[in-house]
Amino acid sequence: MKHALLSASGASRWLNCTPSARLEERLPENTSIYAEEGTLAHELADLTNKYNFSMDKMTKTKFNRVMTGLKENPLYSEEMEEHISEFCTYIREEFRQFKLETKDPFISFEERLDYSKYVPEGFGTGDAVIITDGTLKLIDLKYGKGVPVSAQDNKQLMLYALGAYEKYGFLYDIDTIEMTIYQPRLDNIDSYTMPVDELLEWANGELADKAKLAYDGAGEYKAGEHCKFCKAKAICRARAEENLKLQSYEYKTSELLSNGEIADILKIAERLINWANDVNAYALSQALQGEKFEGFKVVEGRSTRKYADENAVVEKLYTIGYSDDQLFEMKLIGVSSMEKLIGKRKFSELIGEYVHKPKGKPTLAPTADKREEYNSAEYDFKDVVIEG
């Protein structure tokens, strides 16, 4: 499938760092198991949604045939199917509610949304678009579980909204845009509403200006959080220079660091570690292809001993008198593995009451983190060793 140079999914990058789109264009395509997993999840969602709403002549027979094919994908799991079922149920409930409030609401799935009026050759795919009296609602599935995704000021969804408005604005009197992120593996459902006028003001101003720069490969390179998924993140000079500047932090002339200085270092360290890991991963991949980096070589990493033939080991030890009780240990599989084995819903129904989640150990996080601040008075310090 052809992807737009200025894609909606990459908007946070090319809007913040306008030359990055053309730079990425020069680099080879790459994928990951996470991207492939997300693609499969979207295919499952599209199939289920169209069956639920009787679209594309989706009979039970056709549904089962296509589903059987999707289940052959090694990334498929019952857990994924259950998460997608929950997502599709959410959409059905949203649509049912709209039907109670308005006459003949419209819905579509996996629809091409063209926003090229504002972004050269720009288009994307909307997971679900619902239109009711005065409101255009976009629902976007995020199958990743790395970090919760916010709908507020989400440029990807805003571009989808522009595409949907351009397509249906002349048919419906739309004055409000509602955007929702549905992230089932993190139980994250986040929505944000904005007036159409505000969306169009952004589109005709900041978006159009930066999109032209990005399409032309012009503007200045700028490092930041948006670098995370950039293909050039490990070898981008602008990002390197930005991170190397962090090392020039000036400390006060005193023997001990102040709390303020420690806080500054913690902020710097996370960025440097992430950048260093990206560079290391890139260098290793290139070295494995024959590239040389002065002062470094590829070596075999540490490994642990394993039985080459477990059956042979057992048979050998049986012959000299060892018993099953001595050779084997039985242990209940972990909570996550059990939930995956029997399915999230059945897990909750059958054994949910026997599962508890103890308090996590304290960890430092930025103040913007949504988790509540830890109550140190409740923490059990009996296992904490303080040296000195």
Image (spheres, rainbow, N blue to C red):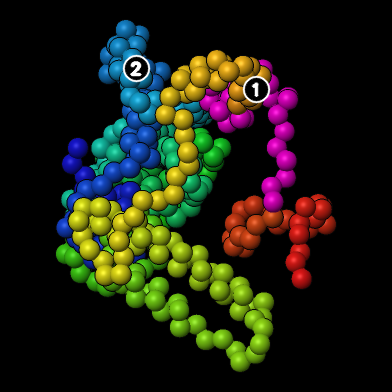
| Front label number (1 vs 2) | 1
Amino acid type, mark 1 = Gln
Q: Quadrant of the N terminus?
A: top left
Residue shown at the point (25%, 37%) measured from the top left:
112
Q: Quadrant of residue 35?
A: top left
> From what the image shows, is residue 234 above or below residue 371?
below
Q: Is residue 48 left or right of residue 232?
A: right
Q: Nearer the viewer, residue 333 or 197?
A: 333
Residue 98 image position (x, y, % from top left): 49, 29
For the record, the magenta segment spans: 334-361
What crowding class fits label 1: few (fewer than 14 Cα within 10 Å), some (14-19), or many (20 or more)? Answer: few
Q: Residue 191: give its label.
A: none
Amino acid type, mark 2 = Met
Magenta span: chief secondary structure: helix
* Label 1 vs 2, first from the N-terminus: 2
Residue shown at the point (50%, 48%) measured from the top left:
147
The residue indicated by pointer 2 is: 67
* Number of marks in picture: 2
Residue shown at the point (45%, 83%) measured from the top left:
248
| Contact between labelled residues 2 and 1, with CB atoms less than 8 Å apart | no
Q: Quadrant of the C terminus?
A: bottom right
Q: Is residue 28 left or right of residue 181?
A: left
The residue indicated by pointer 1 is: 326
Residue 307 image position (x, y, % from top left): 46, 30
Residue 314 image position (x, y, % from top left): 52, 19
